[in-house]
Image (spheres, rainbow, N blue to C red):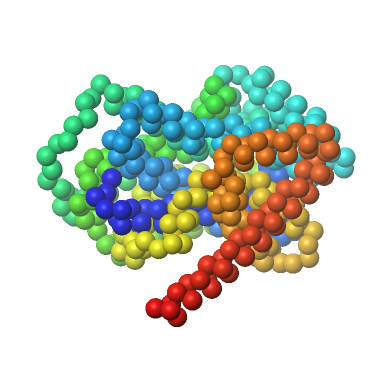
């Protein structure tokens, strides 16, 4: 995409921050009851409206921005290999980890949730079999809202849904580009700053209309717009977010074609910061004041009805709540798009110089995304009854998980992928025979060994840097 490697740095830095933000989202979910009543490990006493509200803005921009950045690199990568080689590499990079994760740890979420809901949890091998039985019995198109009880072991792709979506839309782009010959064209006239800003604002307005219309259509046809859909047992996405994800991916392809980020001027971070702050602040305000109180009561009823036979009628939403939802639907697309432009302009201005740390983190960002989910669940289960305040738990878990995953990727997954796959599969097979307690303790030990390794190597790196400065 860029002419010099240096100009890749700010995109890598944005991607790193977004991936670590995903880790934080999953950590906070433990304290976001009842908004996250379905989560495997819940601390009801430690939950508060603060954590619920914290999740809301992060849900706006995380995955759409990651998709936008991924779209920027498709055609540059195709210039370096044949379409078949590229698809093969994408499959190995994106989908093989999904398969390995599902076999080795796809059922851990279910097992931990069953332990939370039942005084006596089922045998781990039973959960494993039920998980794959649900996969076999799943229809071609499956809505998660059709799940009637929390005690059911359901099949889903967990956080790896993003990798499946990225793989399939990348595959579609590659296949659709095949009829067109790749050739070096003459440099085109780049859009001016005013035109780029205007086109982005128009795109945001159009997306507001489309997204709000889609959500209204869902409500009219009684479709749960917060549910997930699984297609062909291999592709998963959220029914409402897909109306943002696909356009943001296409927006990335458009920005690459127009060379906005290589030769153009997208505007200053101050402009986009102001434009992003207004819809984002209003979005959070509408949710916090106008929606969450009613939504929490509805979700508590949903949780009760998914656990017990004595069903309770769900509270009705009054006109003010419905209006608040409509306002959030209109505000979400511009908040997402303007935040993306803010990230791009801010990072390009202040975080565009390569260094050893950002290079290292960028190299392992996708593995951190894949690996982090189970360590988060294991540590949430470990810290559940530890008598410390929730904010300290959030900080500790985040600080442990990210370095541990980086080190595990650095020392095992990245340099020896086949050995890593064999190790995790072998550990899983032993766990099926020894039980979930063994698996939990083994994973916990692996987390802290990896964290200790990260601390040790970080200390060595700091000492080496100091010695280098002294010698210079």
Residue at image coords 54%, 26%: 234
Res. 273 in view: no
* Left-right relation of 460 to 78: right
Q: Residue furthest bottom?
A: 470
Residue at image coords 41%, 47%: 65
Residue at image coords 20%, 52%: 264
* Left-right relation of 308 to 58: right
Q: Looking at the image, which is closer to me, 328 or 241?
A: 241
State the image coordinates of residue 446 (x, y, percent, origin top left). Answer: 70, 51
In the rendered view of the protein, which quadrant contains the N terminus? top left
User: Quarter-wise, where is residue 453 in the image?
Assistant: bottom right
State the image coordinates of residue 349 (x, y, percent, origin top left). Answer: 30, 64
466 relative to 288, above or below: below
Residue at image coords 78%, 65%: 387
Q: Residue furthest right?
A: 120
State the image coordinates of residue 133 (x, y, percent, origin top left). Answer: 71, 23
State the image coordinates of residue 6 (x, y, percent, origin top left). Answer: 31, 57
Q: Looking at the image, which is closer to me, 450 or 69?
A: 450
Q: Looking at the image, which is closer to me, 370 or 260?
A: 370
194 relative to 326, above or below: below
Numbered marks: total: 0
* Left-right relation of 332 to 123: left
Res. 7 in view: yes
In the rendered view of the protein, which quadrant contains the C terminus? bottom left
Q: Looking at the image, which is closer to me, 155 or 470?
A: 470
């Amino acid at each position: 995409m860029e002419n010099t490697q240096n100009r890749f740095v700010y995109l890598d830095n944005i991607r790193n921050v977004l991936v670590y933000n995903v880790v934080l989202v999953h950590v906070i979910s433990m304290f976001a009851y009842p908004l996250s009543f379905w989560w495997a490990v819940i601390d009801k006493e430690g939950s508060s409206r603060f954590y619920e509200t914290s999740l809301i803005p992060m849900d706006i921009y995380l995955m759409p921005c990651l998709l936008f950045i991924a779209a920027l690199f498709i055609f540059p990568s195709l210039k370096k290999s044949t379409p078949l080689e590229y698809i093969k590499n994408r499959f190995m990079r994106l989908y093989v980890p999904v398969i390995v994760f599902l076999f080795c740890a796809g059922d851990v979420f279910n097992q931990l949730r069953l332990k939370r809901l039942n005084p006596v949890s089922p045998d781990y091998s039973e959960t494993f079999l039920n998980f794959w039985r649900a996969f076999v019995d799943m229809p071609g198109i499956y809505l998660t809202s059709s799940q009637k009880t929390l005690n059911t072991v359901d099949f889903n792709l967990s956080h790896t849904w993003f990798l499946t979506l990225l793989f399939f839309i990348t595959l579609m782009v590659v296949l659709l580009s095949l009829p067109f010959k790749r050739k070096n064209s003459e440099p085109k006239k780049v859009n001016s700053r005013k035109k780029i800003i205007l086109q982005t604002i128009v795109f945001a307005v159009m997306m507001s209309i489309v997204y709000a219309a889609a959500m209204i259509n869902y409500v009219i046809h009684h479709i749960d717009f917060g549910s997930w859909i699984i297609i062909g047992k291999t592709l998963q996405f959220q029914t409402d977010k897909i109306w943002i994800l696909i356009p943001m991916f296409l927006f990335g392809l458009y920005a690459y074609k127009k060379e906005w980020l290589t030769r153009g001027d997208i505007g200053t971070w101050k402009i986009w910061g102001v434009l992003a702050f207004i819809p984002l602040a209003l979005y959070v305000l509408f949710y916090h004041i106008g929606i969450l109180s009613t939504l929490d009561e509805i979700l508590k009823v949903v949780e009760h009805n998914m656990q017990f036979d004595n069903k309770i009628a769900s509270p009705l939403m009054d006109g003010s709540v419905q209006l608040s939802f409509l306002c959030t639907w209109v505000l979400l697309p511009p908040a997402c798009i303007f935040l993306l432009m803010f990230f791009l302009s801010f990072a390009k201005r202040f975080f565009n110089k390569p260094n050893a740390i950002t290079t290292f983190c960028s190299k392992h960002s996708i593995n951190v995304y894949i690996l982090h989910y189970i360590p988060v669940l294991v540590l949430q289960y470990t810290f559940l009854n530890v008598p410390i305040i929730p904010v300290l738990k959030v900080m500790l878990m985040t600080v442990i998980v990210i370095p541990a995953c980086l080190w595990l990727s650095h020392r095992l997954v990245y340099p020896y992928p086949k050995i890593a796959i064999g190790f995790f599969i072998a550990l899983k097979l032993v766990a099926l025979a020894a039980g979930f307690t063994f698996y939990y303790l083994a994973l916990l030990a692996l987390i802290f060994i990896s964290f200790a390794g990260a601390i040790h190597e970080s200390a060595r790196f700091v000492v080496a840097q100091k010695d280098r400065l002294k010698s210079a």
